[in-house]
């Protein structure tokens, strides 16, 4: 029965992409609205789960429970402020600007170091022709992004800069198109398996 | 120099401390990093919840319920807009308890079915068709024939670039081929031509990932520099009053 609901709703939504027929478009809109509402309710169920997991850590005083207590406090304060005054109010924006934003930016900054370390590890641990091509291209593109190669006027520099742009705009663009098409084919096939009820992640 | 209100001053110092706490992970996992990350998860989860409440749940579920007269619920449009979403929501909430979770299958199936259709539709109309058209466009006569007054070297470069782009796309797709037959030991069986194309495809993947890696590294280095500059500005602002 659940498979029939998934297949039926999925087919009407999919048809709405390709057939301009009012009944199908209306049905698709209704199904999409219900799904957005259900996704929001599912988000709240996820938040409730987060709360219960950390609450049990605090109540049983497991290792690292003070961090769980901090998470619960931050979660409840932000949620209550957001629910009462709206997500655009001054306090919610302060929490967003002075806590969420700097931590996100800090994590992204950390990524620079770990990406560089991962590049060095690749060179030292996996020495095959593809890794070599990857590292050489990455170094060449990085050098071309920097000021020495990127802004100098000598003939050699201009040639290297043009070569760098050619690799990035032609070789990598063609490759990115192939990867995008491959990913879209894979995603489409996975979706079709659900629509044909071959995969049933919602249970039987 | 930037003028700080008290609230801005406290917020900026908090932001600077949190930045230092996150960057302290470079020395290894420590309590300061954990403090910053748990705080971040709590605030991000609360903020996401409040946005979902105000933008989706209140206007879609609560407001239609409280703004209707009792008789109005029996109208067909309100059954679709109010009664069915509430029934689906209640069924989904039954998933919380193991005893009642089997009744929550219907909304989950609806969510999965619509999600899968959006993924398939998005993949076809958003990627497969436009990218295939763009790949085909590299071989149209208007692209390949020499333009009036165009130098031979420029025309040749254009032709070679178009061939390389097409070769990259095709060989990567051949490397990604999902339906190869398998041999007795489970390995994919490919013809000699397919094996050569797959190797060329891997070379193009390595080049593409190399360019993407360089772009990601350059972008994150810029963010790292911005964070260090922010810390320097905060310290200098505090020291100079």
Image (cartoon, helix red, strand yellow):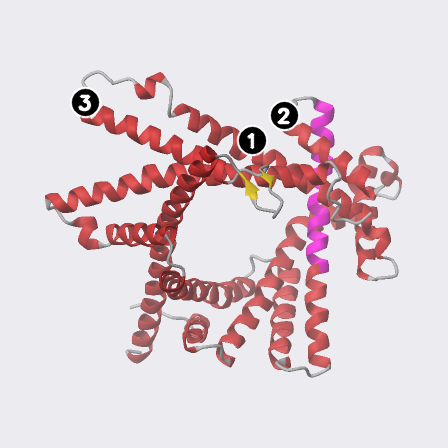
Front residue of A68/B124: it is: B124
Identified at 38% across, 19% down, the residue is B140
Q: Quick one: which residue is furthest to the left in this view?
A: A154
Sequence-first disc among 1 and 3? 1
User: Where does label 1 land, which residue?
Assistant: B125
Query: The residue tagged with tag 2: helix, strand or loop?
Result: helix
Rendered position, B66 above or below A44: above
Q: Is residue B176 left or right of residue A155?
A: right
Identified at 81% across, 49% down, the residue is B105
Considering the whole magenta stretch, tell me its main secondary structure.
helix
The answer to if A31 sits in the magenta stretch is yes
Q: Position of residue A159 (x, y in %)?
A: 17, 42
Identified at 69% across, 21% down, the residue is A21
User: Where does label 2 land, which residue?
Assistant: A18
Q: Are marks 2 and 1 in contact (CB under 8 Å)?
A: yes
* Mark 2 belongs to chain: A
Q: Position of residue B45 (x, y in %)?
A: 61, 63
Q: Are marks 1 and 3 in contact (CB under 8 Å)?
A: no
Rendered position, B105 above or below B198: below
Q: Dot 3: within a 10 Å radius of its alpha carbon, few (fewer than 14), some, or many (20 or more) residues? A: few
Corner quadrant of residue A198: top right
Identified at 70% across, 71% down, the residue is A53
Q: Nearer the viewer, mark 3 or mark 2?
A: 3
User: Where does label 3 land, which residue?
Assistant: B152
Corner quadrant of residue A34: top right
Query: Bounds of the magenta span?
Result: A22-45
What is the distance, in whole Å, between disc 2 and disc 1 at their CAs?
Answer: 9 Å
Q: Position of residue A14 (x, y in %)?
A: 67, 32
């Amino acid at each position: 029965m659940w498979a029939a609901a998934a297949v039926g709703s999925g087919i009407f939504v999919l048809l709405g992409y390709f057939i301009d027929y009012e009944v199908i478009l209306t049905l698709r809109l209704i199904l999409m609205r219900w799904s957005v509402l259900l996704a929001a309710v599912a988000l709240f169920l996820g938040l409730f789960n987060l709360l219960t997991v950390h609450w049990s850590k605090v109540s049983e005083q497991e290792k690292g429970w003070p961090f769980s207590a901090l998470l619960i406090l931050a979660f409840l304060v932000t949620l209550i402020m957001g629910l009462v005054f709206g997500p655009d109010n001054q306090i919610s924006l302060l929490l967003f600007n002075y806590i969420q934003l700097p931590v996100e930016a800090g994590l992204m900054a950390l990524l620079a170091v770990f990406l560089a370390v991962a590049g060095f590890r690749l060179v030292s641990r996996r020495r095959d022709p593809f890794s070599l091509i990857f590292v050489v291209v990455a170094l060449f593109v990085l050098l071309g992004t920097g000021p020495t190669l990127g802004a100098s006027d000598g003939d050699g520099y201009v040639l290297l800069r043009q070569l760098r742009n050619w690799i990035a705009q032609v070789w990598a663009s063609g490759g990115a198109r192939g990867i995008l098409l491959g990913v879209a084919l894979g995603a489409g096939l996975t979706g079709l398996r659900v629509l044909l009820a071959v995969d049933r992640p919602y249970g039987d | 120099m930037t003028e700080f209100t008290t609230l801005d001053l406290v917020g900026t110092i908090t932001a600077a401390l949190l930045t230092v706490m996150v960057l302290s992970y470079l020395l290894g996992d420590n309590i300061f990093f954990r403090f910053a990350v748990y705080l971040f998860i709590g605030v991000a989860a609360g903020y996401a919840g409040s946005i979902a409440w105000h933008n989706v749940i209140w206007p879609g579920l609560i407001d239609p319920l409280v703004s209707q007269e009792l008789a109005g619920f029996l109208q067909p449009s309100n059954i679709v807009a109010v009664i069915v979403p509430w029934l689906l929501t209640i069924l989904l909430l039954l998933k919380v308890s193991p005893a009642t979770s089997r009744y929550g299958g219907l909304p989950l199936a609806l969510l999965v079915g619509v999600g899968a259709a959006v993924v398939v539709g998005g993949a076809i109309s958003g990627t497969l068709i436009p990218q295939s058209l763009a790949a085909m466009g590299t071989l149209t006569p208007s692209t390949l024939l020499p333009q009036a007054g165009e130098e031979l070297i420029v025309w040749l470069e254009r032709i070679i670039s178009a061939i390389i782009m097409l070769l990259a796309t095709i060989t990567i797709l051949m490397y990604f081929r999902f339906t190869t037959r398998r041999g007795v030991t489970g390995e994919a069986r490919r013809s000699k031509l397919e094996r050569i194309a797959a190797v060329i495809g891997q070379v193009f993947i390595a080049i593409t990932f190399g360019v993407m890696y360089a772009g990601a590294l350059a972008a994150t280095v810029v963010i790292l520099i911005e964070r260090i500059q922010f810390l320097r500005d905060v310290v200098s602002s505090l020291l100079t009053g």
